[in-house]
Image (tube, rainbow, N blue to C red):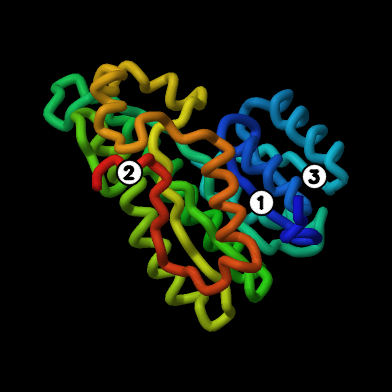
Amino acid sequence: MQQSLKGKVVLITGGSRGLGATMAEVFADHGANVAISYLASSEKAEAVVEKLRAKGVRALAIKSDQADLSSAKLLINSVLAEFGKLDVLVNNAGIAIQGQTVDDPGLDEEKYNRQWQVNVMGSIANTRAAAPKLADGGRIIFIGSRLGDYVPFRGVADYAGTKAALVGYARGIARDLGPRNITVNVVQPGVMLTDMNKDVANHLPPLETFLDMHPIRRFATLEEVAEAVCFLAGPHGGYITGETLNIAGGIGI
């Protein structure tokens, strides 16, 4: 594989499992040195780090609670202390709380409010901390969701709202950082077979009905999404900014 990102330093939040772990490996395959953040899965995080180092790149796992906005500067400073720079920030960490409608008298407001804190305010805090330190010509990529602008079933209003908020924020940042040739984009996957999506699978329509909504009648693979993120982070993605890329099999067209 051509190492188009050789020597670059990438931070992937929420990188101990699922899409985050796959992105870490794909970035390493492209030659990048990779830092990942994690909250609770220290063993999984260290296992990812070992895989990355076996590919011949430098790697680091940093414990960081994205719900604690004060942790963002510590996270970015830890990356700079270890690697001396930051070229790419991938705001991947997030949670999915779904299933209750907004008029549900038993709505668990605490859980749903925390989702906004983690998915939106946590990503904003990371971005604010990283932006002044990010190398000119760098990249910021938010991992959104196809639900951010297409909602075909009930019970996902808050989750969809958190992902839609990232799109507007990313476009504003793209304006702010354009003079430094820093690109800012959002990648919106559809359903992927991750632990997080398994947790909310019972809130989706029946499998056959849901697949029938997709012109390409299957779910996205983690590798497909990860390679798209790497493209946006690489040398051929330098003139793409303020955009939203759906990787969702055509659902919603």
43 and 232: which is toward the camera = 232
The disc labelled 3 sits on which kind of residue? Answer: Ala
Q: In this rendering, which labeled residue sits more in front, label 3 or label 2?
A: 2
Going by the image, does 20 lie left or right of 199? right
State the CA–CA distance, disc 2 to disc 1.
29 Å
Q: Amino acid at mark 2?
A: Gly
Residue 167 locus on image (x, y percent): 36, 57
**In this view, 105 is above or below 229:** above
SS of the residue under disc 2 = loop
Q: Residues within 10 Å of mark 3 (few under 14, many from 20)?
A: many
C-beta proximity under 8 Å, tags 3 and 1: no
Disc 1 residue type (three-letter): Leu
The residue located at (42%, 67%) in the rendering is 242
**Is residue 15 placed above or below 144 in the rendered structure?**
above
Residue under pointer 2: 250
Q: Answer with mark 3 or mark 1, whichever residue precedes in sequence.
A: 1
Q: Residues within 10 Å of mark 1 (few under 14, many from 20)?
A: many
Residue for point 76% across, 28% down: 47
- Element under disc 3: strand
Q: Position of residue 243 (x, y in %)?
A: 41, 63
Q: Which residue is mark 3?
A: 59
Query: Does residue 113 appear left or right of residue 40 in this picture?
Result: left
* Label 3 close to label 2 by CB (< 8 Å): no
CA gap between label 3 and label 2 equals 35 Å
Q: Nearer the viewer, residue 100 or 181?
A: 181
Question: Residue 152 location, x and y as percent?
Answer: 20, 35
**Residue placed at 31% from the left, 51% from the top?**
164
Disc 1 target residue? 11
Residue occupying image coordinates x 65% and y 33%: 16
